[in-house]
Each structure stands twice: as C-alpha cells, then as structure tokens.
Image (cartoon, rainbow, N blue to C red):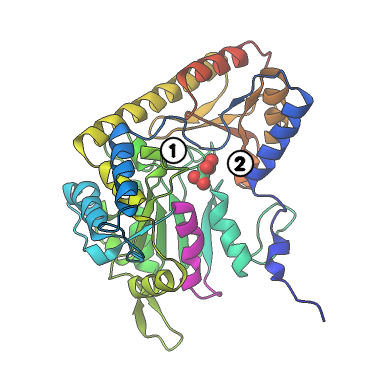
Amino acid sequence: MAVKINENYLLIKSNYIFSEINQRVEKYQNDNPDADIIRMGIGDVTRPLPEAVTRKFTEAVQEMGDAKSFRGYGPEQGYDFLIEEIIKNDYAPRGIDLSVDEVFVSDGAKCDTGNIQEIFDLSSTVAVTDPVYPVYVESNVMAGRTGPMMDDGRYQKLVYIPCTEENGFIPELPETPVDLIYLCFPNNPTGMALTTEQLAQWVDYARENNSIILFDAAYEAYIQEDNIPHSIYEIEGAREVAIEFRSFSKNAGFTGTRCAYTVVPKEVMGFDSAGNPHSLNSLWNRRQTTKFNGVSYPIQVAACAVYSPEGRAEIRESIDYYMQNASIIRNSLKDIGLRVYGGVNSPYIWVKTPGDMNSWEFFDLLLDEAHIVGTPGVGFGPSGEGYLRLTAFNTLENTEKAMERISKLSL
Ligand code: MLT
C-alpha cells in the first residue's frame, strides 16, 4: 500500500502566484535574451541593508567565531535584547504596553501568518478580504479548513470580503459571524489603508462576535498620513481580540535576511470544546518551542540596529525613496488615463486594467510590449480580476524607465 498524501494540497493551484510569475518571466527572458526586463512584480526590496545594520551584523558573526562569545541555541521566542527594543520603539511611543513574553521573534511574517492557523480548530470559520495575500488562504486550504475551490475561484467554506472600486477597497463587516479574520493594512495587494475609525469597527465586531483578528502590519513603515493606525493595539479593546504580525523585511530590507515578530497579548483567548478558555499566547509559545528554534543570533543583533539612530535615519531614507517611486508610478499612470489606487501609505499600486482586459492579458501586454513585470490582480483572489499590482521597490532609474515605456503604449 502506497503512502497517502495530504489531499488538501490537491485543492490549491499547482503554483504559488509568485513562482508562477517567475516561471513565465524566465521563459520570456530565455525566448527574448535582449529584453531589458524591469521587475515590479513580487514585493521584494532592492535597497541594501542599512550600514548600521550590516556593521552590527558583521560584529555578531565575529562573536560567533570566538569561543568566548560563541552562542548556541537561543530562546525560541527571540532574545530579550531585541524584544525590548521592539517594545520600546514600535509600541511604547504609541501608548501600547506589552510584556516581553507577548512578542515572538521569527524568520518572517509569511511563516507566522501561514502557521498561526494551526492553533485553531479545523472547524473555525475563516474570513479573508478579497483580493488577499495568498498565504492566508492557502495555509488554511492545506490544513483542510476551506473545502474545494468553486467555479468562481472561491473556496467553498471561506468567507470572502470583497474590496473593490465600489466600496473604495474598504472591507465591509461580514454578514454572518466568523471565528478568524485576516486583515492586512496597509493592504497587500491594493495598497489601501484603514483609518482608526474603520479599524475600530473591526475590533468592535470581533469583540461582539467572539472573533479573533489576525492583523498583518508588515507595511506599517510606509504609512504617511495621520489617522492611520500603525498597530491594531492603538484601538481600544484590541488586546483581547487581535494578534499582530510585523516584519523587518519591507522597512529595513530583511527579505533575504529574515526577521519578523508576532505579538500575542495574553488576554487573547480561544476555547476548548468544553468551553474552557485558553490563552493563545501559551498555545503559540507551545507551537514555537516545538517547531521553531529561533532566529540566528547575528540576525537578531542586526535587527536591533534597525532601532539605532543611524539605522532609523537610513531606513527613513529608503522608505522615502520607495515612496517617491510610488508617487511617480501613481502620477504617470494617472496621466495616461489609468485608474490607480494605493501607493500613498504603501509601496503597492493597484491598477485597473485598461478597457475590458483581464489581469493576465494586461500582465502579458506589459511584459511583451514594455518588458515590465507586474502581478496579475486575479492571483490575489477573484475580486482582483481586472487589476494588476505594481511595486515601488525597484530603483528610481528603473521606475522612471518603466513609466516612460508604459506611457508610450497605446492603452
Ligand atoms: C508580495 O509580493 O506580495 C510579497 O512578496 C509578499 C511577501 O512578503 O511574501
């Protein structure tokens, strides 16, 4: 008898969206070796790590090579020296009190947002915004919580909350109560942000319906406007109903270095089948101590340097650089009559495809005729059909070149 597989894997598309795009672009480049392709697809940064970060990183690597300062396994939850900096810099100034054992350092918000569902029952109902970062959906498909995909591209048991031009890409509260709600703001992929009042409605909803909000704040550093919350815990009552995910990838260039953290306040409770409450903080701690051995010491030292005065200044400069690109993209596309969203509090620009072109048609057109790679909106969910996402993470030079090429197309 052959080994049986987890058949839930058969319910997902054979390729992760960004792997699919890579394959197509690679094929295109092989067929057209002279094409100077500008990548504005995956949300990967291009600016190097800040100097303040690499300096500390290097010193910490040297420490590991010296018997006197060598360190073996660290705490699975992360070193206190980093967690204390996180609390002191990212939360305390916003009036949010956290204790050291409420913050879990990890190797990425992608892993944490994908893994968090493990601590919930398979019968939990799950709501996602549509379009959505595919990790939230696919990790629940793999776990067996969603049922099959239907003809309209939606999974049978997931609750989809459309974010469309009609509602200004602001998700409306679900009509029927749900257990788990994934929210990512500033949003990937639409680039739109929620105001404090808008996010407060979700916190109130979660409190009234005993739901838990899984809040992905990976793009928090890009917020430019006032009245956009940087953390869900700025909203009263959120400590009881929300888990927050943050990352050093997009603010400090750690996409290849890997460091992030997840906040699980001790008050957030889940219930066993007898109705007894259990702290999700303890469950997540239990999960991490079994399945994760912590982020390497040099990387945590490097992440700490993000909070140094020099580190902060360098990061601010990179974010301003990317946001200048975002504004160039927004303005250039508007000038040629396209409808564009996002890019104000986020490095993502969400573009309505011209005419009645679908997402992949527009993707192909940009690749063929302008050698530009975007991400087809439909890759983020059915409500993303008819859109394409561009990132502001390329260089200024490439961003300007890309916009020049697009403006020459007859769209
Ligand atoms: C994206 O392009 O959406 C990002 O790469 C997401 C991620 O950080 O995994």
Q: Secondary structure at mark 1?
A: loop
* Residue 160 appears in the rendering: no
Number of numbered discs: 2
Determine whether 299 is above or below 401 in the image.
Answer: below
Q: Secondary structure at mark 2?
A: helix
Mark nearer the N terminus (2 vs 1): 1
Disc 2: which residue: 384
- Residue 403, x across and y down, in percent: 55, 16
Q: Quadrant of the C terminus?
A: top right
Give the farthest residue toward the bottom.
274
- Residue 322, x across and y down, in percent: 41, 27
Magenta-drawn segment: 108-124
Residue type at the position of mark 1:
Met
Magenta residue check for 114: yes
Disc 1: which residue: 192
> In the image shown, does 289 or 144 lie closer to the viewer?
289
Residue type at the position of mark 2:
Gly
Q: Is mark 2 within 8 Å of ligand 1?
A: no
Q: Within 10 angstroms of label 2, few (less than 14), some, or many (20 or more) residues?
A: many
Determine whether 117 is above or below 320 in the image.
Answer: below
Residue drawn 36% across and 38% down? 252
Magenta residue check for 146: no
Would you say the residues marked 2 and 1 are in contact, meaning their CB atoms lie under 8 Å apart? no
- Residue 400, x across and y down, in percent: 51, 15
- Residue 218, x across and y down, in percent: 40, 46
> In the image shown, does 125 or 11 lie closer to the viewer?
11
